[in-house]
Image (cartoon, grey):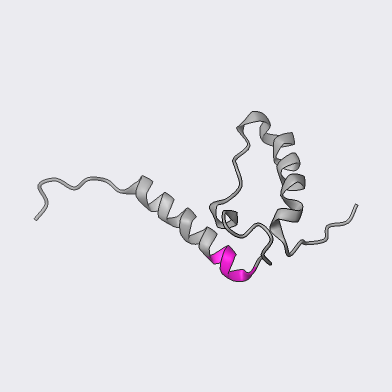
Amino acid sequence: VEYGPCVVASDCWSLLLEFLQSFLGSHTPGAPAVFGNRHDAVYSPADTMVQYMELFNKIRKQQQVPVAGIR
């Protein structure tokens, strides 16, 4: 078995999905939003940065606690 990274994400998404399903079963997430309009585009470091920004924003929104009565 050999790992060879793929530069076009849509070419390997089915393989990644199959791998995730072996661990997560029916709880497998859908394709990341970053792939939405760029199915045949070359994956770049900027795409990774966008994914991290989305993840950090999601975590930040979950951790926000309403502050009441603090001046």
Q: Say which quarter of the image contains residue 27.
A: top right
User: Is 42 situated above or below 62?
Assistant: below
The one nearer the camera, 55 or 7, is 7
| Magenta segment | 44-49
Q: Position of residue 1 (x, y in %)?
A: 91, 52
- Mainly helix, strand or loop, the magenta region? helix
**Percent x, y of residue 47:** 58, 65
Please report the residue visible at 59 percent of the width from the left and 40 percent of the height from the top.
29
Q: Residue furthest right?
A: 1
Direction bottom: furthest residue: 45
Could you tell whether 46 is left or right of 22 in the image? Answer: left
Image quadrant in which you'd find residue 49: bottom right
**Horizontal arrangement in the rendering, residue 9 relative to residue 49 (left or right):** right
Q: Nearer the viewer, residue 45 or 71?
A: 45
- Residue 52, magenta (yes or no): no
Q: Nearer the viewer, residue 44 or 59?
A: 44
Is residue 45 magenta-colored? yes
Quadrant of the rendered image containing residue 3 = bottom right
Q: What residue is rendered at 41% in x and 55% in y?
A: 57
Q: Residue placed at 58% from the left, 63% from the top?
A: 48
The location of residue 28, given as percent across then percent down, is 63, 37
| Residue at screen point 45% across, 56% down | 56
Point out the image quarter for the C terminus. Answer: bottom left
